């Protein structure tokens, strides 16, 4: 059984390994930026329609926070027991071997991480185009220009220095939270002036019954909106005072996000009422329009653009670290496994990630909306590896670990709850893609294709690895 890695803080900077330079506040804003994306401007519509009443809706969002907190505690144990820049990749490698970890790393670099960066770049480009058009004559290229530019700029900022990327993240996250507070503040104003939705102003004699059949599906949207906190594991080797600060960062971030989500949903509900929420196609814009009038569309466009920026930058930071871990494990990929000690970043992995994201942006421009679907249909791949990471907690408890690592309270109950949740999300995502198609191809085959290509590459890499020994 392999021995646990030494704490990176004990390594000499000359050895090219991560050092513990990331501060607690930087970790918090990174996690918040990873989680809060454009989903909070869209998902509440689906959740309101599926839960059936306001009580069920708020319970769903509270439950989403509780489940996320349980998962965060599980990841806090993994990240403090086995601190490594590879995050999930490292946990999977220790529990199941390098081959399974390679498939996970391949899925991240090919579609999970780079695909997310490309999709978020398109969201940013679309909304910035509404604010400031960059189209050239009849050539509608504004969104494409914005998307390419933002991937390059944010990648460059993170290549410069880890703290440059973190300071950028702090700025974007602060603006993002202010944007959400504008929605909440608008609802408070409507309530105080008596202009809120009449249905929320008066007590109801009988609340509509909760639609239990739709509650489970609503939780899929809620948990997707809470997604991203697990990426904190990728900075476990760089976080100052790793054991305490990893737990603090995860618990504080998820608590703050849950509170923000509840307040934003309260703002939607107060302004539009439950039927209005369920029927609205642009729930945030409809809410803001009650306060800001015609200027609401511009404000919401700016809000979503900022949210996209925040998520892109955070994804760039953590995404390259799994590629770095792959480079450490496989000699043919060793260029990815170079850590720049002067900048304290995996520069080569960031460059490759940037180029791969640009390729996907170009691909997305060529095939249009089908690209969005292609990335969304790989969700089962993500949930499969997320489930494996959760199960790895049970396997890795038997391995040597870092001293004084955090331990999940109420073990094994909380890890079982987390794994069952991941299993449910895997089943739900499989059910969804099985009923969808892209062209004439069943969407379920897209995830299979990603893994099959990964298996082919694994065979090539293994052969090259043996030749390089």
Image (cartoon, rainbow, N blue to C red):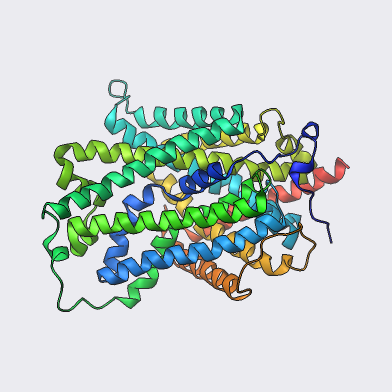
Give percent across and percent down for residue 90.
70, 53
Specify whether 163 is left or right of 127.
Answer: right
Closest to the observer: 14 or 404? Answer: 404
Q: Quadrant of the N terminus?
A: bottom right
Can you tell which quarter of the image residue 247 is in?
A: bottom right
Q: Quadrant of the C terminus?
A: top right
Quick check: 16 above or below 432?
above
User: Residue at coordinates 70% horizontally, 37% vertically from top-left?
Assistant: 336
User: Residue at coordinates 27% horizontally, 50% vertically from top-left?
Assistant: 184
Give percent across and percent down for residue 145.
41, 27
Q: How many marks?
A: 0
Is residue 406 shown to the viewer in this render?
Answer: yes
Closest to the observer: 303 or 403? Answer: 403
Q: Residue furthest top?
A: 137
Give percent across and percent down for residue 121.
43, 37
Specify whether 138 is left or right of 241.
Answer: left
Give percent across and percent down for residue 407.
66, 65
Q: Residue furthest right?
A: 469
Quick check: 136 above or below 262?
above
Is residue 366 shown to the viewer in this render?
Answer: no
User: Residue at coordinates 28% horizontally, 30% vertically from top-left?
Assistant: 131
Closest to the observer: 51 or 441? Answer: 51
User: Residue at coordinates 58% horizontally, 52% vertically from top-left?
Assistant: 450
């Amino acid at each position: 059984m392999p021995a646990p890695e030494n704490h990176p803080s004990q390594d000499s900077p000359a050895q090219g390994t991560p050092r513990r330079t990331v501060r607690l506040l930087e970790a918090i804003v990174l996690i918040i930026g990873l989680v809060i994306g454009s989903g909070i401007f869209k998902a509440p519509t689906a959740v309101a329609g599926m839960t059936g009443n306001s009580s069920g809706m708020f319970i769903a969002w509270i439950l989403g926070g509780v489940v996320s907190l349980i998962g965060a505690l599980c990841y806090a144990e993994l990240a403090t027991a086995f601190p490594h820049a590879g995050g999930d990749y490292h946990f999977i490698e220790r529990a199941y071997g390098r081959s399974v970890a390679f498939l996970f790393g391949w899925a991240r670099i090919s579609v999970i991480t780079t695909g997310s960066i490309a999709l978020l770049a398109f969201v940013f480009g679309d909304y910035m185009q509404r604010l400031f058009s960059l189209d050239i004559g009849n050539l509608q290229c504004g969104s494409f220009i914005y998307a390419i530019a933002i991937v390059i700029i944010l990648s460059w900022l993170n290549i410069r220095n880890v703290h440059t990327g973190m300071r950028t993240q702090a700025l974007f996250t602060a603006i993002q939270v202010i944007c959400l507070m504008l929605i909440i503040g608008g609802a408070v104003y409507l309530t105080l002036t008596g202009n809120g939705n009449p249905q929320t102003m008066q007590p109801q004699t009988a609340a509509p019954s909760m639609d239990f059949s739709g509650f489970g599906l609503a939780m899929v949207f809620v948990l997707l909106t809470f997604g991203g906190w697990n990426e904190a594991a990728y900075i476990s080797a760089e976080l100052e005072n790793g054991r305490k600060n990893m737990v603090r960062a995860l618990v504080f971030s998820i608590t703050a996000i849950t509170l923000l989500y509840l307040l934003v949903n309260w703002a939607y509900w107060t302004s539009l009422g439950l039927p209005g929420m369920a029927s609205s196609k642009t729930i945030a814009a409809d809410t803001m329009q009650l306060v800001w009038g015609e200027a609401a569309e511009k404000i919401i466009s700016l809000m979503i653009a900022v949210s996209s920026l925040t998520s892109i930058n955070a994804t760039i930071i953590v995404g390259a670290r799994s590629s770095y871990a792959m480079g450490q494990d496989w000699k043919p990929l060793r260029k990815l496994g170079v850590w720049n000690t002067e900048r304290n970043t995996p520069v080569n992995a960031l460059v490759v990630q940037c180029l791969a994201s640009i390729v996907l942006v170009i691909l997305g421009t060529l095939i249009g909306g089908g690209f969005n679907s292609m990335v969304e249909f790989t969700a089962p791949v993500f949930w499969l590896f997320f489930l494996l990471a959760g199960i790895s907690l049970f396997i890795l408890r038997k391995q040597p670990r870092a001293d004084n690592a955090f331990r999940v309270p109420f073990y094994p109950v909380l890890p079982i709850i987390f794994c069952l949740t991941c299993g449910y999300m895997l089943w739900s995502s499989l059910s969804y893609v099985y009923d969808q198609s892209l062209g004439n191809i069943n969407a379920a085959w897209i995830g299979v294709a990603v893994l099959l290509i990964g298996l082919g590459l694994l065979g090539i890499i293994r052969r090259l690895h043996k030749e390089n020994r």
